[in-house]
Amino acid sequence: MQTFRRSANTVFVVSLLALVFGVGGLIVLAYAIQGSPYVTRAFDVREQPVQFSHERHVAGNGIDCRYCHTSVETSAFAGIPPTKTCMNCHSQIFADSPYLEPVRASFRDDRSIAWTRVHDLPDFVYFDHSIHVNKGVGCSTCHGRVDLMPLVFQVETLQMNWCLDCHRNPEKYVRPRDQVFRMDYQPPADQIALGRKLVAEYNIRSLTSCSTCHR
């Protein structure tokens, strides 16, 4: 005596396929959410104590990154400028602007402005600005066109797979050292050929072991 109808085979196969594709879809969805701006906070403008405009200072006034981020070439940390750096100009320019009172108060009281970190890596990740800059990785490669941002926001995920893509294929991203701080730098048509040349010239190694970033 037949226990199941013949159609049960079809139901079983359809159910099995639905289960497989359903689980696969959930995995793909979870992966997409994990890398989405909702999780990474990419393109999320952060409120700051003073709404400092990189667009005005970099593109408008032509100030080089290193004027404010003084340790970017020599230290792991790019450096947040002390208030005195701001006052070098603003003791003369917009010296009475109410908008800049928090800056003047910081200078008067010798109390640092509590800026909000935009590119904030987890504590278990080690990142050294100086090694990247000196190996030909441009500021805009990671930070985007900050010269076009009235308020700075993160443009990349800053997740491990993003870092590893560059570490595995540095020739796609490196540029001549004298172009590192140019915001408007555009990779040439022969970027791969140029990149391979620079990888050899700058002695860039493809470091992908865990201990490179997790120490």
Image (cartoon, rainbow, N blue to C red):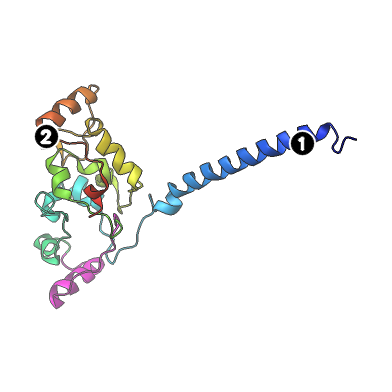
Q: 201 or 151: which is nearer to us?
A: 201
Residue type pointed to by label 2: Asn
- Disc 2 and disc 1 in contact, CB within 8 angstroms: no
Q: Is residue 111 magenta?
A: yes
Q: 214 or 150: which is nearer to us?
A: 214
Region rendered in magenta: 95-120
Q: Quarter of the image for the N terminus: give it.
A: top right
Q: Is residue 153 magenta?
A: no
Circle 2 Cα neighbour tier, 10 Å, few/some/many (<14 / 14–19 / ≥20): few
For the point 15% across and 66% down, which residue is it? 95
Residue 103 picture location, percent across and down: 19, 68
Residue beneath label 1, please? 11
Label of residue 203 in the image: 2
Residue 2 picture location, percent across and down: 88, 35
Count of labels shown? 2
* Furthest-bottom residue in this view: 109
Residue 122 picture location, percent across and down: 31, 58
Q: 175 or 66: which is nearer to us?
A: 175
